[in-house]
Amino acid sequence: MTLAITPGTTTAVPAVVGADLRVPLVTGERVTYANLDHAASAPCLQEVRDAVDELLPWYASVHRGAGFASQVSTRVYEQARDRVRRFVGAHASDAVVFTRNTTDSLNLLARSVPKNTAVVLFDSEHHAALLPWRGPNVQRVPAPSSSGAAIVALDRALAAAPVGPRLVIVTGASNVTGELWPVAELAKVARRHGARIALDAAQLAPHRPINARELGVDYIVFSGHKIYAPFGAGVLVGRADWLQQAQPYLVGGGATSKVTDHGDRLGVAWSAVPERHEAGSPNVVGVHALAAACEILSRHWEQTIAHEQELLARLQEGLRTIPGFRELAILTDADKVGVVSFTISGFDAGFLAAALSAEYGIGVRDGAFCAHVIVGRLVKQVGSHEERAVRASIGLGTTAEHVDRLVAALRALVTEGPKWTYEQRDGRWVPQDDNRTLPPFLA
Ligand SMILES: Cc1ncc(COP(=O)(O)O)c(C=O)c1O
């Protein structure tokens, strides 16, 4: 097992691939990369890479081959369902459908709900959760300003929802602010109104243990690449009945048990869940990596949470000393995972992100984080005219030095200005005369 104690923190956490990555600066120097963009895509865990390496010699077709390696790969793929089920504390009867990512999982769920299902969600959701639901039966509830207000608002929205099947979608942790939503309480409200509830755990799964049974949620979705397993797999776990009644999400091989030729038409018997929604050759490498990440994270929650909370406190404390810094917040009373989105008055978010990368070797995200509605509202609340912010996000690859470097770099940018010249090209800030060389495999 590879554990790393990061300088300035007291806890040992699973090590990530690329911890020593050196990146070029516009000045020609090289520095260790400070990845403060875990919320977008987390680096691969060393142990996940080891698990993938172990599988690769055995890699072969899944569900399609009599060869021994095919049988091994099929076994790996099928066992991953139980490994994921354990990670989220799902019911034994819950379906585990492997997908490409959270977006894919939510689109699958949206295609599978019975016709006329009333869908209720907060307008602070990520586009992946906000957009798949269309039509008159979708209620977008304005984002509340506290956990208590969220519960009251959901109760009200469900009381007004039409009779029939109902589904609530809620995020576990906001990708904009990192705040933890009161999922168990919202699930109770949903249950009281006869609604099912789906948990978008894309930002929760890397940072906190999840137990579907204790939370009382019906569906959970998340992505491998956000839990340190960037091999193209995601998952939807949850009640099987709607999924079983739905038309297959993708049609093709694997989703069918029998296809017969009736001359003018084909007769198709669709497979049962989960294969029904997994047409095409399954991504066994991605699924194995995802399941391995689930198990590795499960063994280290205490250290992971301590590590991230220590760094989050350091980050917030440092950022609050920067002139003009304003942190975005939705649920002002909630605990949060290591995500801080902010504006700095007088500075464009895109410019700050470009300069942090070019002059300091720091990776952050800028923009509206696929949550345009809420980011637009929050930046206005903090007095900004641009519908953009900077997001720094912490994870297992973050060190105290990364955090300190970000704070020092922002202070220098704000008080002394950039050391390089930047221009806007196609709407993005870029350094002029950018001679940073790409890695040799891209050259
Ligand atoms: C809360 C939340 N939901 C859904 C998604 C979509 O995840 P993916 O891009 O892996 O489909 C993201 C990605 O940032 C997210 O943060």
Image (cartoon, rainbow, N blue to C red):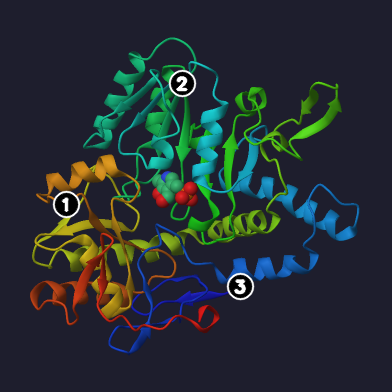
Instruction: State the mark number for residue 1.
Output: 3
Q: Quadrant of residue 400?
A: bottom left
Q: Residues within 10 Å of mark 1 (few under 14, many from 20)?
A: some
Callout 1–callout 2 Cβ contact below 8 Å: no
Q: Is residue 218 visible?
A: no
| Amino acid type, residue under disc 3 in the picture | Met
Looking at the image, is 219 positioned above or below residue 205? above
Q: Residues within 10 Å of mark 3 (few under 14, many from 20)?
A: few
Q: Earlier in the sequence, mark 1 or mark 2?
A: 2
Looking at the image, is 363 positioned above or below residue 85? below
Which residue is disc 1 drawn over?
Answer: 386
Which residue is disc 2 drawn over?
Answer: 195
- Is the CB of mark 2 within 8 Å of ligand 1? no
Question: Residue 117 location, x and y as percent?
Answer: 48, 18
Is residue 378 rendered to the left or right of residue 44? Answer: left
The residue shown at (30%, 34%) is 123
Q: Nearer the viewer, residue 18 or 144?
A: 18
- Is the CB of mark 3 within 8 Å of ligand 1? no
The residue shown at (29%, 28%) is 141
Looking at the image, is 46 positioned above or below residue 82? below
Q: CA distance from mark 3 to mark 2?
A: 43 Å
Dot 2 lies on which element? Answer: loop
Callout 3–callout 2 Cβ contact below 8 Å: no
